[in-house]
Image (cartoon, rainbow, N blue to C red):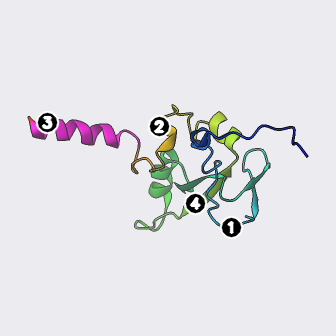
């Protein structure tokens, strides 16, 4: 009995498909989440997660509320939200970007911190060397 498909002996062709865009490792099945943006079902290990900590009141109104408040040292609570995106919504809303073929292999997460802080640190490091 002959099969109609051709078996490839080249093992290097599957190097990009090693993880399949997932972090499942040895698990057979992973629960699904709903995308925050479009409500698509996404496996929990494949979803792009973003954790947002934000003040309830925006910065413009914060000073006005502080002036009108009876309590001078009252700190307004924050909103803690974990967002889950499917891959297409994360790319569309610029949460993640597409990367070159070589840089896709690196799985180390980017440096943490507020945007622009990395550039300041690099400039300070260069000034200290000089």
Q: Residue 63's x, y, as percent? A: 45, 50
Magenta span: predominant SS is helix
Considering the numbered disc 2 on the image, is that residue within a helix, a strand or a loop? helix
Closer to us: 47 or 72: 47
Q: Earlier in the sequence, mark 1 or mark 4?
A: 1
Q: Earlier in the sequence, mark 3 or mark 2?
A: 2
Image quadrant in which you'd find residue 125 = top left
Instruction: Specify start and end residues of the magenta stretch as a single range.
Output: 115-129
Q: Residue 11's x, y, as percent? A: 60, 43
Question: Dot 2, how many residues are within 10 Å of its Cα: few (below 14), some (14-19), or many (20+)?
Answer: few
Q: Where does label 1 land, which residue?
A: 27
Q: Cα distance, mark 4 to mark 3?
A: 38 Å
> Pointers 1 and 4 in contact (CB under 8 A)?
no
Image quadrant in which you'd find residue 51 = bottom right
Considering the numbered disc 4 on the image, is that residue within a helix, a strand or a loop? strand
Query: Is residue 24 positioned above or below 124 on the image?
Result: below
- Determine the residue located farthest toward the front in the rendered image: 1
Q: Residue 118's x, y, as percent? A: 33, 42
Q: Where does label 3 land, which residue?
A: 127
Q: Earlier in the sequence, mark 1 or mark 3?
A: 1
Residue drawn at point x = 53 percent, y = 65 percent: 77
Please identify the quadrant where the C terminus is shown.
top left
Q: Where does label 2 land, which residue?
A: 103
- Determine the residue located farthest toward the left in the rendered image: 130
Q: Where does label 4 land, which residue?
A: 79
Closer to us: 47 or 50: 47
Q: Is residue 11 magenta?
A: no
């Amino acid at each position: 009995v002959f099969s109609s498909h051709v078996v490839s002996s080249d093992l290097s062709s599957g190097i990009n498909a090693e993880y399949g865009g997932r972090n499942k490792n040895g698990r057979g099945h992973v629960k699904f989440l709903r995308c925050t943006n479009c409500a698509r079902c996404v496996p929990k290990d494949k979803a792009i997660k973003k954790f947002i900590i934000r003040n309830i009141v925006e910065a413009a109104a914060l000073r006005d509320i502080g002036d009108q408040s009876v309590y001078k040292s009252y700190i307004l609570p924050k909103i803690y939200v974990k967002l889950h995106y499917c891959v297409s919504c994360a790319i569309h809303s610029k949460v993640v970007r597409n990367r070159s073929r070589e840089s896709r292999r690196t799985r180390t997460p980017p440096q943490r911190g507020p945007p622009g802080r990395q550039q300041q640190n690099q400039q300070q490091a260069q000034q200290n060397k000089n």
